[in-house]
Image: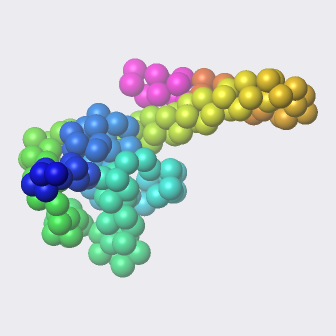
Amino acid sequence: PDRSIRPREKVATPGNEIRENSPPFQLMLATAIHPEHFAYVRTQLSHQEISGATAQLLYSLLEEQYRNQNLSFDKIIADINNEALKNFILKKAAADEYGSEPGKYIGLAVLRVRYEIQAERRREVEMLMKQAEQRSENQLLRELLEEKIYLDGALQELKDSIHDRTAE
């Protein structure tokens, strides 16, 4: 076999593993550019709730700097080893991507990530409901139905909050 052809290595760069428009990536990008808002973000979302390698990397960098009380844009940029990601962030920062009110953008992005998390859980519950129904597990089916009803309400609340904030 030709050894010069290797499987593509997954590199955490925008446009490769992470879609540039994914809510977690957009949230962490905005927070990396405006790290003064990380204290709020970390009260709303844990590292485990952030999907995607690049978004998780940015969360980890911010968390480490936050704990060391050394949170700054310059330090974040210095700590990023991936040149493509570093250049992407610098380009977005130079373009003033988040305008004069980054806090509003970040607050909205948190809601979008929370919506994405709840929607994924709802899909899981629906799949589990189908399996429970096929196996005639009525008690489990009732519990899952209760969770689905709760998630439907939570999703509607998040959707309304997102709509209200985008209308401002």
Q: Nearer the viewer, residue 10 or 5?
A: 5
- Is the C terminus in the top left, top right, bottom left or bottom right quadrant? top left
Residue 61 occupies which quadrant of the picture?
Answer: bottom left
Q: Is residue 56 above or below residue 140?
A: below
> What segment carries the magenta color?
158-168
Q: Residue at x 37, y 64 (%)?
A: 60
Asked if residue 164 lies in the magenta stretch, the reply is yes
Check if residue 14 falls in the magenta segment. no
Q: Percent from the top left, x then y, of residue 134?
A: 79, 23
State which quadrant residue 17 falls in: top left
Q: Residue furthest bottom?
A: 68
The chief SS type of the magenta part is: helix
Choose between 114 and 163: the one closer to the eye. 114
- What residue appears at the point 74 percent right and 29 percent down from the top-left corner? 131
In the rendered structure, the answer to whether residue 45 lies left or right of residue 166 reads right
x, y percent for residue 95 = 10, 41
Q: Is residue 130 above or below residue 78?
A: above
On the image, the x and y values in percent for residue 113 come to 46, 39
Q: Is residue 143 above or below residue 90?
A: above
On the question of residue 98 being in view, the answer is: no
| Image coordinates for residue 124, horizontal then vertical, percent | 63, 34
108 w.r.t. 25: above or below:
above
Q: Is residue 56 visible?
A: yes
Q: Residue at x 28, y 37 (%)?
A: 19
